Amino acid sequence: MAKIQTVGIIGSGQMGAGIAHVAALAGYEVRLHDVAADHLGRQVAKEVIDQAAMTAAIGRIKGAETVAEIGQCDIAIEAATENEEVKKSIFRGLTEHLKPETILASNTSSISITRLASVTDRPGKFIGLHFMNPVPIMKLVEIIRGIATDADTYETAVSFAQSLGKTTANSEDFPAFIVNRILAPMINEAVYTLYEGVGTVSSIDTAMKLGANHPMGPLELGDFIGLDTLLSIMNVLHEGLADSKYRPCPLLVKYVEAGWLGKKSGRGFYDYRGETPVPTR
Ligand code: NAD
């Protein structure tokens, strides 16, 4: 099994910051790279720095100005925007800077690991490591092997996830894997019930929290995931499985077009700009 000591992360949004948080707490040296430097600073501050008990961990997280620094880590985890072209261009740009033994991972929620691996020089050392949001709280890491992923990479990835205190579940490399194959259509269906006027935002969320014992309502959960990410996942399912049951709700499309991406942008199915979230419909 490969030895992991340094963890490079590309993309420091909700997920990248969370992965940095748990990796640093587990004792790994972390290098974090994002195209939006201010986003990095803000996210590191919000997720990590303001927790007094984490002083030592914070010392292990450093910003990386360029992807070249990420390429020198033992594992490089891509956690950038859920868009196949963005991810492929990151992996293409990273490949020339990689040391031979570096393992590549993507935190994608839905995109083919085999296709992402194919743009690199090492499909055998490429794997899907799908952390859940919020990373410090959620126990699962879904592990997705591409068609070429080798046994050593798989074992190293499982052991790395376990070293972060996570439990793993394996999924085959099909659109949206297990969690989002089931979860994203459920949330999309909740948006359809809103779109068709079956219920309001609060009636839909209350119904599913108290009627199905879900800890969060589906619309609240959509806002928490990010509506742009949810729409991308639905598009991957729709295109990848060619079944109309996965068509994204037009109301979801409209929210994303408006830039109402959920909690991370301040507004989605709820408006988060005041003291308490207020339904937007
Ligand atoms: P986010 O919008 O919070 O963050 C994405 C970050 O990627 C941003 O900071 C952006 O500046 C950065 N980025 C974009 N292009 C880049 C590039 N070329 N190089 C470097 N950084 C770049 O999104 P998120 O919720 O953190 O999601 C990130 C990934 O994690 C996606 O693939 C998503 O599907 C996956 N994921 C999300 C969730 C969730 O619930 N939000 C859960 C599991 C996995």
Image: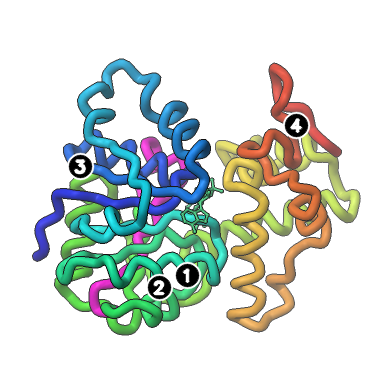
Q: Quadrant of the N terminus?
A: bottom left
| Residue 238 visible to an observer of this rendering | yes
Determine the CA span between mark 2 and mark 4.
38 Å
Q: Nearer the viewer, mark 4 or mark 1?
A: 1
Sequence-wise, which precedes: disc 2 or disc 3? Answer: 3
Q: Quadrant of residue 201?
A: top right
Q: Nearer the viewer, mark 2 or mark 4?
A: 2
Q: Is residue 73 above or below residue 42?
A: below
Residue 138 is covered by the magenta coloring: yes
Q: Give the residues in magenta.
A: 123-140
Residue at point 78% right, 50% down?
A: 255
Q: Quadrant of residue 95?
A: bottom left
What residue is disc 1 on?
89
Image marks 3 and 4: residues in contact by CB distance under 8 Å: no
**The residue under label 4 is which amino acid type?**
Asp
Q: Quadrant of the C terminus?
A: top right
What residue is disc 4 on?
271
Residue at point 29% right, 71% down?
A: 96
Image marks 4 and 1: residues in contact by CB distance under 8 Å: no
Number of the label disc, if any, that sits on residue 29 = 3
Q: Quadrant of residue 264?
A: top right
Q: Secondary structure at mark 2?
A: helix
